[in-house]
Amino acid sequence: MKYSLPELPYKYDSLAPYIDEMTMRIHHTKHHQAYINNLNTVLEKYPRIADKKLEDLMMNLDSQPFDQKDKTVFRNNAGGHLNHSFFWTIMAPEKEIDRKLLEKIKKEFGSEDEFKKQFTASAMGRFGSGWAWLVETPDNKLQVYSTPNQDSPILKGDTPIIGIDVWEHAYYLKYQNKRLEYIENWFNVLKLI
């Protein structure tokens, strides 16, 4: 299976002023495309597993036939593709609030504000590059944590619900080194809550 760059469900300038057009264009067509290119290249070496779902390969990464170098390449680039494909879909120029999710967030975190506080702390606490997540665990609980690099919650068997990319390529053109400002503004384009 050859992976290809998914189309965005909105135009590159649709998330402005919170995320600028140039950042969206570069992030999507250059960074995400690079993960796809590298993923396709490594999977060409392993035709026996190339048609399996990425999520299944990630959840069972240690049982795949990769050598150590290719395992790392696969983990980074499959994660990059999965994470970004997900990231694009949870943002929108207009809110489409998921009332059921919002109620579960309020129940488990006490309030939407408390969830945002914990989520922001997780995103700010990630040293270097990575992601902050709201996930649903296998026992149907919500949990906030961060992952390094392009690691996906799928590696742990968790289902991503909300995720923010805190690699500098996601915000540097507009926000420079102001990660907190980026995170606070990003909530304006998170369509779910």
Image (cartoon, rainbow, N blue to C red):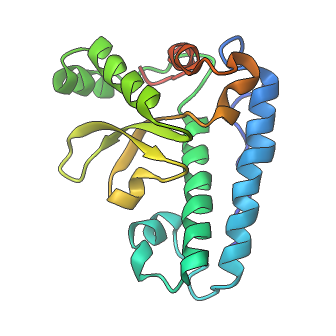
In the displayed structure, 9 sits above or below 46; it is above
Instruction: Say which residue appears at 62% left-offset and 60% top-offset.
Output: 77
Looking at the image, how many numbered discs can be counted on the residues? Answer: 0
Q: In the image shown, does 77 or 85 lie closer to the viewer? A: 77
Residue farthest to the front?
127
Q: Is residue 15 visible?
A: no
Q: Is residue 66 visible?
A: yes
Q: In the image shown, does 5 or 75 lie closer to the viewer? A: 75
Percent across and percent down for residue 185 are 56, 13
In the displayed structure, 33 sits above or below 14; it is below
Instruction: Say which residue appears at 80% left-offset and 33% top-offset.
Output: 25
Q: In the image shown, does 88 or 127 lie closer to the viewer? A: 127
- Location of the N terminus by quadrant is bottom right
Q: Quadrant of residue 133?
A: top left
Q: Quadrant of residue 186?
A: top right
Instruction: Say which residue appears at 82% left-offset and 26% top-offset.
Output: 22
Q: Is residue 164 left or right of residue 92?
A: left
Percent across and percent down for residue 104 are 23, 27
In the displayed structure, 43 sits above or below 158; it is below
Q: Is residue 47 left or right of residue 57?
A: right
